[in-house]
Image: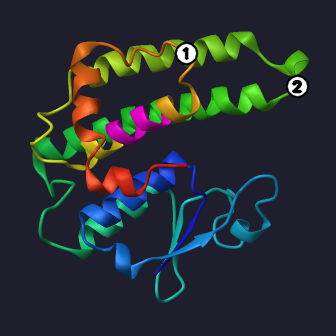
Amino acid sequence: MKLLYSPTSPYVRKVRVVAIEKGLAERIELVAASPWPDPARIVGLNPLGKVPVLVLDDGTPLYDSPVICEYLDSLAAAGPLIPRAGPQRWAVLRLQALADGVLDAAVAIVLERRRPEAERSVASQQRAVAAIRRSVAALATEVRPPDGPFDLGQIAIAVALGYLEFRLGDLDLGTSPRAIGDWWTAVRGRPSLVATQPA
């Protein structure tokens, strides 16, 4: 399998963490393919021009990160990161959706900051910051003990907090409350997160 990736993409990081946690990292070849400024290398496999894209051995492309994570989880029965059925499954997928929403808002702020100052929308940045603060407060009630199961929901939370720290460390985004801050301090040293930390 080949993974089209950008080293600073949090969505890619989530996929890579899942691959490591499932013992699949050695089966995946990393292929650098930045969507900025020209996604030409990507659009033949993903018309959205976004990474990550996982290209299977038969050439089939999978995107985006939730689909790739579920596929990787299905390859090894041991230690499922997504429960197969029942309320636990929906709880994990809901957490992933909330954490991915934090990433969407954070990426929107990062992209807005890259625009010429005169073209930036203060209102859209404020809206994104407010969404992140609300969401981080909600995620703080959902984290499990750091030595507990590290399922896809917990992985998504960790990746979201890591991205906020990496790209938006200058903003107060609600990551300081003890519940989430202590959890992040405890899990950030997990091998899969250390190995995928952006430079």
Residue at left offset 50%, top offset 55%: 12
Relative to the observer, which residue lies in front, 10 or 184?
184
Q: Earlier in the sequence, mark 1 or mark 2?
A: 2
Residue at left offset 90%, top offset 16%: 118
Residue at left offset 12%, top offset 69%: 78
Q: Amino acid at mark 1?
A: Leu
Magenta span: 157-163
Residue 96 vertical position relative to residue 24 in the rendered view, above or below:
above
Percent coordinates x, y for residue 63 in the rendering: 51, 62
Q: Amino acid at mark 2?
A: Pro
Side (left or right) of 109 relative to 162: right
Percent coordinates x, y for residue 155 in the rendering: 30, 46
Q: Give the CA distance from mark 1 to mark 2.
A: 20 Å
Q: Is residue 70 visible?
A: no
Mark 2: give few (<14), some (14-19) or many (20+) Cα within 10 Å.
Answer: few
Percent coordinates x, y for residue 35 in the rendering: 71, 56
Local SS, label 2: loop
Side (left or right) of 42 relative to 167: right
Q: Is residue 73 visible?
A: yes
Mark count: 2
- Give the quadrant of residue 160: top left
Q: Which residue is mark 1?
A: 171
Local SS, label 1: loop
Q: Residue furthest bottom?
A: 58
Query: Is most of the magenta stretch helix, strand or loop?
Result: helix
Side (left or right) of 100 relative to 147: right
Residue 184 highlighted magenta (yes or no): no
Residue at left offset 66%, top offset 31%: 110
Callout in the foreground (1, 2): 1
Percent coordinates x, y for residue 103 in the rendering: 50, 35
Q: Which residue is mark 2?
A: 116
Mark 1: give few (<14), some (14-19) or many (20+) Cα within 10 Å.
Answer: few
